[in-house]
C-alpha cells in the first residue's frame, strides 16, 4: 500500500500469490527496493500454478520506482525453515540479509551471491534456541553490532568468536528480574540500546550494561509492550495493548495516549514507523494514525484537577475555602480527595490509577 499524504490518496499493491492470506511481518527499504517478509502458509503447498516456480514465496521484492513486484532473487521454498514464516528481517552494513523464524532461529544470506552464510557453528545456534526459545527482533546498531531480542533474554552476536553472547538479566531497584521476554530493540541518539518486552522497558549501554529499567510500577499502563521508537528529541515511544506511551527520561515520566486522544484503537501493538523522526505512524487493524510529534511536543496543557473533599482525623472537614485554615495540635491526620474535572466514566467497572507525588 502506498499512501500519498499530499494528494490524500491511497494505492494498494497485492502480493503476487494469496494476497488476502499473507501476514506482513516486516518491511525494509534498500534504495529503491522494498523487501517484505510474510507469514504465508498457502504458497508452501499449492500457491502457484507452476509448482517449480519459487520466485514469490514469503519474501517479496517490490520496486518502488516501477511500482511492481520483482522475482525474489534467491530460493525460498524449503530453503530456510520448515514452515514459510519469515518473522524478522534485517540487512546489515555488509549487505547480509538476516532472516529469522520466531521458533526456528536465524539464517544469514549473502545479498550478492544469494547463498547462505555460515557465521556460526550449528551447536552455537542450538545454544541460542535451546529450551524452545523464540527470536523476536534483530537490530544492527550504529557501531555495526548485531543485537538479538528473544523470549529468554537479550543477546549480541560476537562475530570474531562466532558466538551469541547473552546480556546479564535486567534487575529492578529490588534486585529482581522483571522479565526476560523481549520483543523489540531500538537505538537512541546517544548510541544507547532500548528494549521492550513483557512488563519491561530496559536501557543498555553499547556493551550491554544496564543503565535503567522501568515497569508498570513506574507508570507503564499495560504489561504487553511490542513496539518501540526513538524520536528526534531522544524520547522513547512504546506501543502496548492498552495505549501509546511516551517516555521522557529527563523527567522520568510516562504519558499515555488512547482513543480519547484520537487513536483509532488503544491497541498499538501492530506496527510503528518513524518518518524523519518527527512523525510517528501507528498501525492498527483497519488503518493507522499519524502522530505529529513536533506539535505534540509544543502543546502545553495543565491538568484540570480539583480537591473534592478534605478529611481531618477521618472526619469530613468543612471551612471557608476562600481563607487559609489552621489545624489544631490534635488534628494531626489530614487527607485529600481529588477529582479530574474532565472525568469520563469508563465501561470497565474495575479501574486502577497510579499516582506519583
Image (cartoon, rainbow, N blue to C red):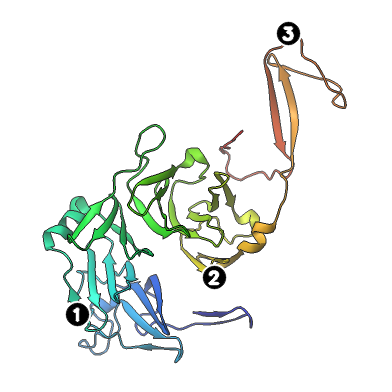
Disc nearer the start of the sequence (3/2): 2
* Labelled disc at residue 276: 2
* x then y, percent, for residue 278: 58, 66
Q: Which residue is mark 1?
A: 115
The residue carrying pointer 2 sits among few (fewer than 14), some (14 to 19) or many (20 or more) residues within 10 Å by Cα, namely: few
Which residue corresponds to the image point at 72% horizontal and 50% vertical from the top-left? 301
The image's mark for residue 329 is 3
Q: Can you tell which quarter of the image residue 47 is in?
A: bottom left
Mark in front: 2 vs 1 = 2
**Image quarter for residue 19?**
bottom left
Looking at this view, is 243 or 179 the one in front? 179
Tell me if 192 is positioned left or right of 122 in this view. right
Label 3 vs label 2: CA separation?
Answer: 60 Å
> Percent position (x, y) of residue 205?
38, 51
Going from N to C along the chain, the mark reached first, 2 or 1, is: 1
Question: Relative to residue 290, is residue 145 drawn left or right?
Answer: left
Distance from label 1 to label 3 (Cα)? 83 Å
Where does residue 15 sit, x and y in percent of width and height?
39, 82
Amino acid at each position: 500500500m502506498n499512501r500519498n499524504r499530499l494528494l490524500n490518496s491511497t494505492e494498494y499493491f497485492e502480493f503476487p500469490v494469496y494476497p488476502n492470506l499473507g501476514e506482513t511481518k516486516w518491511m525494509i527499504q534498500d534504495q529503491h527496493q522494498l523487501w517484505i517478509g510474510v507469514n504465508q502458509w498457502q504458497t508452501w503447498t499449492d500457491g502457484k500454478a507452476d509448482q517449480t516456480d519459487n520466485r514469490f514465496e514469503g519474501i517479496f521484492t517490490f520496486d518502488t520506482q516501477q511500482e511492481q513486484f520483482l522475482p525474489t532473487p534467491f530460493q525460498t521454498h524449503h530453503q530456510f525453515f520448515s514452515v514459510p514464516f519469515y518473522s524478522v528481517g534485517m540487512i546489515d552494513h555488509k549487505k547480509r540479509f538476516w532472516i529469522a523464524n520466531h521458533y526456528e532461529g536465524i539464517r544469514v544470506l549473502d545479498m550478492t551471491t544469494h547463498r547462505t552464510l555460515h557465521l556460526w557453528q550449528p551447536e552455537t545456534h542450538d545454544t541460542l534456541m535451546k529450551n524452545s526459545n523464540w527470536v523476536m527482533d534483530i537490530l544492527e546498531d550504529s557501531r555495526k553490532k548485531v543485537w538479538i531480542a528473544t523470549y529468554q533474554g537479550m543477546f549480541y552476536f560476537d562475530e570474531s568468536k562466532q558466538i551469541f553472547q547473552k546480556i546479564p538479566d535486567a534487575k529492578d531497584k529490588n534486585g529482581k528480574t522483571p522479565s526476560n521476554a523481549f520483543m523489540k530493540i531500538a537505538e537512541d541518539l546517544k548510541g544507547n540500546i532500548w528494549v521492550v518486552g513483557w512488563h519491561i522497558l530496559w536501557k543498555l549501554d553499547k556493551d550491554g550494561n544496564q543503565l535503567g529499567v522501568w515497569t508498570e510500577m513506574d507508570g507503564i499502563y499495560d504489561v504487553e509492550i511490542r513496539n518501540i521508537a526513538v524520536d528526534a528529541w531522544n524520547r522513547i515511544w512504546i506501543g502496548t495493548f492498552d495505549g501509546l506511551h511516551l517516555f521522557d527520561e529527563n523527567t522520568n515520566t510516562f504519558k499515555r495516549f488512547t482513543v480519547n486522544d484520537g487513536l483509532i484503537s488503544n491497541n498499538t501493538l501492530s506496527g510503528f514507523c518513524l518518518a524523519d523522526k518527527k512523525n510517528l505512524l501507528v498501525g492498527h487493524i483497519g488503518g493507522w494514525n499519524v502522530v505529529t510529534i513536533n506539535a505534540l511536543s509544543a502543546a502545553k496543557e495543565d491538568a484540570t484537577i480539583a480537591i473534592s473533599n478534605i478529611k481531618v482525623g477521618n472526619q469530613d472537614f468543612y471551612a471557608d475555602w476562600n481563607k487559609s485554615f489552621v489545624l489544631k495540635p490534635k488534628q494531626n491526620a489530614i487527607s485529600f480527595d481529588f477529582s479530574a474535572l474532565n472525568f469520563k466514566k469508563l465501561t470497565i467497572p474495575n479501574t486502577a490509577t497510579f499516582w506519583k507525588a
